[in-house]
Image: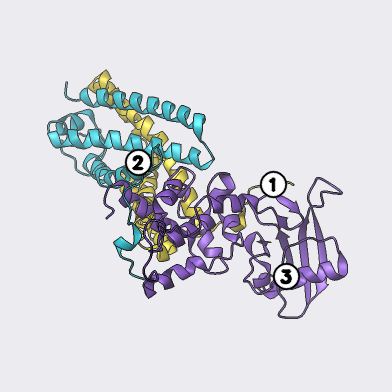
Chain colours: A purple, B cyan, C yellow
Amino acid sequence: MLARLKIRRYQPETSQEPYYQTFEVDVPEGATVLDALLEVREYLDGTLTLRASCRSSICGSCGMRINGVSRLACKTHVTDVAPRGQEITIEPLANLPVIKDLVADMDPFWRKWREVTPWLVTNEEKEKPEREHLMGNKLALYLNQFAGCIACGVCYSACPIVAIDDEYLGPAALAKALRYSYDPRDHGKRRRLARLAEEQGLWRCHTIFSCAEQCPKRVNPTEAIQQLKKMVILARLGLAR
Amino acid sequence: MAQVELEDKVREAPMPVAGLSFWPWFLQRVTGVVIVILLTLHIVVNHIFNIAEVEDDILPGLVVYKDVADRFETPAYWVIAVLLLSFALFHGLNGIRNILLDYGLRGMGDRIVIGALLGVGMAAFTFGIIGLAAFIA
Amino acid sequence: MYKPVDAQFQARAMRTGTVAWLLQRLSGIFLTVYLIIHIIVIGNSVRGEDAFDDLLGLFENPLMLVLDAGLVGVVAFHALNGIRLILFDLAIGLRFQKVLFWMAFIVALGVFIGSAVAVRNIIVD
C-alpha cells in the first residue's frame, strides 16, 4: 500500500525557513503513520527527525498533527486518514516551538506542568501515620483516568486557548492538578488551588472540549477543569467543609 | 462516574486568592442567569403586551413613548429596568475583558482595560438612568 | 527554533466545541455594541415625547424590523448557549456537550423564525 506523506520540514542547520516535502513509501495494509514515517527515515531521507519510542501509544513521544488534527502517530492508521490513498499532511504539535522537523520543544509544557504542584503533598511531618493511607475504590477508579495521562502534549496542541494565550496552564497540567486535588491523601490543595485560581489557570478554559476529544488515552481534561472550578467556587463562597 | 463526597474534595479552609480572577468570572455567570429571565420579560412586555391602545399609524408591537411612560408607573418595572441596565452592562463589558484576557492581557494592560471598561460602563449607566428617569417627568 | 502559526482557526479544527465558543464570543461582542446603541436610543427620551416617537419611527421600516427579529435570534442563541456553559460549570452535561449545543442553536433558530413571522405579519398588515 502506498502512503503519501507531506511533511513539514525544518532543518535549522541549513535554513531558518520551514518547508513542506512530500514522500511516497510502500507500507503494509495495517501500517500506522509512524510506520510510514520510520520507513521514510530508514530508506528515503535519514535527516527526517521525529520522536518515537514504544510505537504502542503508551510512551507519549510521537504526538504530532496529522491532517491538522493533533494525535499520536503510532495510533493513527494510514487507512484511517487516507482511505483512498490521499496525501497525508504531517506537522509538529501546535502551540509549541519547533526544534527540528517534527520535534516540538516540550519545555513550556513541562514548565506549566510543574506549576500545579503535580505530586502528593503529605502532612507526615505533623502527623505520623499509624497505618496506611486509605482511598475508596470508586475514587481510585475515577482518578485512574487522570493518572493515565502520558504527557504526550496532544491536548495542549489541540487547545485553541493555549494557541492564543502563552501563559494559559493548559489541559494536561490542569487535569494532573485534579488527580492530586481529589486524592484524599493530599494536603497540598490550598497551595495548588491558589495557583489554579489565577487568571492564567482555570478561568481561561471555555469548555471547548478539543482536549477531551483528542486525548489518545481518554483523559478528560475538561471534566477535570470543571471539577476544579467547582472546588474553587465552593471555597471562595465559604461553602467548603 | 464515582460519587465523590464533598469532604473528600475540599478539606481545607478557603484559600486566600486575591485579585480579579474569581469574582468577575463568577458574576458573569450570575448576571447571565438573571439577564436571561429579565430580558425575556423585557422583550415580552415591550413588544407583545401592548398596554396602551394601538393608534392607527403605529404598528402593533412597536414602542411609543406613551406606552413606556405608562409602564413606569409600576415600581416593579423600574426595578427590572435598573437591574437589567446594570447587569447587562457588567455582563457585556466584562465579556469584552474576558476576550482580551484570552489573548494574554495581563498586568498593566489589564489595569488599563479595566479602567476603560469601568469608564464606559459608568457613563452608559448614568446615561441610561437619566433616560429612564425622563419617562416619569 | 520557530513557533508554528496558530492552528486554531484552520477549517479542520472547527469542531462543535470550537464553533460554540466562537459563536458565543461573536454574539457577545455584537450584543454589547447593540446594548450601548440601545441605551443611547432610549436615552432620547430626554428630548421629549415627540422627538422620541419620531426617532423610533425610523425603526419601523421592514428592514429594521427584520434586523430586530435577527437580534432576538442572536439573544436567544447567546442566552441558551450561555446556559449550556453554566451547566458545564456545575459539571452537569459535560458528556452531552454537542447535543446541548445543537439544542441551543435550533431553539434559537426557532425563536428567530417565530420573530420573523411575527414581523412579517406586522409588515403585511
Looking at the rendered structure, the kind of residue marked 2 is Trp
Q: Do tag 2 and tag 3 residues touch (Cβ < 8 Å)?
A: no
Query: Disc 2 is attached to a residue of which chain?
Result: B
Task: Please rate how many residues cluster around mark 2, counting C-alpha atoms within 10 Å: few if below 14, some from 14 to 19, many from 20.
Answer: few
| Rendered image quadrant of residue A69 | bottom right
Mark 1 lies on residue: C3
**Residue A160 visible, this orientation:** no
Mark 3 lies on residue: A34
Q: Nearer the viewer, residue A6 or A241?
A: A241
Mark 2, secondary structure of its residue? helix
Q: Residue at x 52, y 64 (%)?
A: A213
Task: Please rate how many residues cluster around mark 3, counting C-alpha atoms within 10 Å: few if below 14, some from 14 to 19, many from 20.
Answer: many
Mark 2 lies on residue: B23
B64 relative to A137, above or below: above
Looking at the rendered structure, the kind of residue marked 3 is Leu
Inter-mark Cα distance, 2 to 1? 34 Å
Q: Residue at x 81, y 45 (%)?
A: A16
User: Are labels 2 and 3 assigned to the same chain?
Assistant: no
User: Are labels 3 and 1 assigned to the same chain?
Assistant: no
